[in-house]
Each structure stands twice: as C-alpha cells, then as structure tokens.
Amino acid sequence: MSHIDTFLFKCAFISYFKKLIAVCICLFLLTQISSCYPLIGYPLRAVNRPLNQHFLGKPAKEPFTELKEIFTPYKDPHPNSRHIWGGYPIQKTFVKHYQAKGTVLYVDINDALIKGWYLAGKSESSKMYKKVAPVDLSIAVGKTGQPENIRNLNIGHEENGLFISYTNAYYSEKEVENIHVIPATPKLTKVLKNLQKYDIVYIEGFLVNWGGTGELSRTKFNTAQYAGQISHQRAGGVETGLCLQLYLTKIIFNGHVYQ
C-alpha cells in the first residue's frame, strides 16, 4: 500500500469513526430524553420491540382474556429475608401473588442516567429506590381500561405519582394501578422499558413489602394489597391511592412471554 493509499485509508477511518461516535451520542441523548418524554422514544421502541420479541420472548397465550387483576393470598416461606436487588442489600416479604391484564397508561423509567441522577440527588435512599424499582408501570383494567375510554383520559406521571383528569370518560380508582416494578431479571427490565401507552399487557409476580438494611434500614416501602387501597400520604391535602410494589416474574405481550 502506498503512502497516499495509507493516508486516504486513515482519513476514511477517522471519518467513519467520528460518524459512529456521533450516532452513539445521538442514541444516548434520545434514550435519556425519552425517559422524561416517552413520545420522543418511539423510534427506539419501534426497533427494540421486535428484537426483544425475537431474541427474548417465546410464543404464549395469556391466562385470561378480560382486563382484570387478581390478588391471591400468599404466605412467604422466608419473610424478612435478605437479598441483593439493584446492587443494594434489601429485606423483603412477599404478601400477595398478583396477576393483571391491563392497558398501559404510562411507563416511567426511573433509572435513566441523567434523570435518575436528577431525581435521586444526594439521597442514598432515593438512589436505592431508583435502582431496585427502575420502572413505574401504570395500567388500567375493567371498563376504565378499555382503549377507547383511555383516549379520553388526561394522564400524567411525575415523581412516582400517577395523575389522571377527565371530562367525558368513565373512571374508577379501583380499576387503575400505579406499579413500582422490581424486575426479577434484566430481560424483564428491557421489555418493560419498551412498553408504551395503549399497549395491552399481562403481568404477574408478587406484591412485596421491602426496605433497605444497615444504614438504610429506616427506608421502607409497603405495597397496596387490594384494588383502591388508600395511602396514609396525601397530595395537597387530598387522599391518594397506595401504589403496588411488584416483584415482577412474568410479562406476556403481543403473544410472547418473557420471564
């Protein structure tokens, strides 16, 4: 290879390398921005969803056809057991087995690099929460969850809270769940993050009371155990629903199961 050919090769290599870096930066920024504004992330989900289905899922049928949720009593054989979740040592007790088929209202990604850093700040307990429960999934079942009805609801989600307003729509608080999801596997995390509004999804797992250990032992989170359970916390003096803390073991979406 002549000196001229070598020089041209180096120039071409540097040019392609710069383009590759530019593409990576754009993808990173798109991912980070879409964690705050889900609509922006549609192009990424359009690519990721069929890839997840092909490489991570297996064909499966859902256990039931109607939009509903089932709370089944469960006695944890190892209450207050210790585990490593999200890189943190935690203590947990499963309290109910949970199944639901619902329409997605909102998917909020908590552990995106920039967003997670901003929301957690310097609080170690907040950092733990974002890592243990990286995704908030809001769903609706029953009449509220019918896709044609949801399109008439005004839905917002911020700081782990779900906010809904409506005029010409049906709405029942007992048919809406805001779920803080603790995925059992990285595969489930990938699928969760690529769900979007109006998807119909089946989810299954265990409702769990959990908290930190050691210096974070005062940080505890209790789950709702039935539909419409009211939280002791209030927002602007108004009663709020208690969220589900769900250790997720299975998702069925678009005819494929992930677990």
Image (cartoon, grey):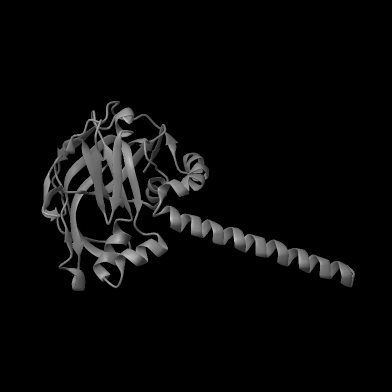
Q: Residue 50 appears at what percent x and percent y?
A: 50, 39
Of 239 and 48, nearer the camera is 239
Q: How many marks?
A: 0
Q: Residue 83 appears at what percent x and percent y?
A: 25, 61
Residue farthest along the front direction in this orientation: 167
In the figure, 147 relative to 41: above or below? above
- Tell me the quadrant of the picture where the N terminus can be found: bottom right
Q: Residue 108 appears at what percent x and percent y?
A: 34, 51
Residue farthest along the right direction in this orientation: 2
In the figure, 125 relative to 133: above or below? below
**Residue at x 18%, y 34% (from the top left corner):** 172
Q: Is residue 225 visible?
A: yes
In the figure, 131 relative to 152: above or below? below
Q: Toward which corner of the image does residue 14 lie, by quadrant?
A: bottom right
- Tell me the quadrant of the picture where the C terminus can be found: top left
Q: Toward which corner of the image does residue 7 lie, by quadrant?
A: bottom right
**Residue at x 61%, y 61% (from the top left corner):** 22
Of 105 and 204, nearer the camera is 105
**Residue at x 23%, y 28% (from the top left corner):** 143
**Residue at x 47%, y 43% (from the top left corner):** 52
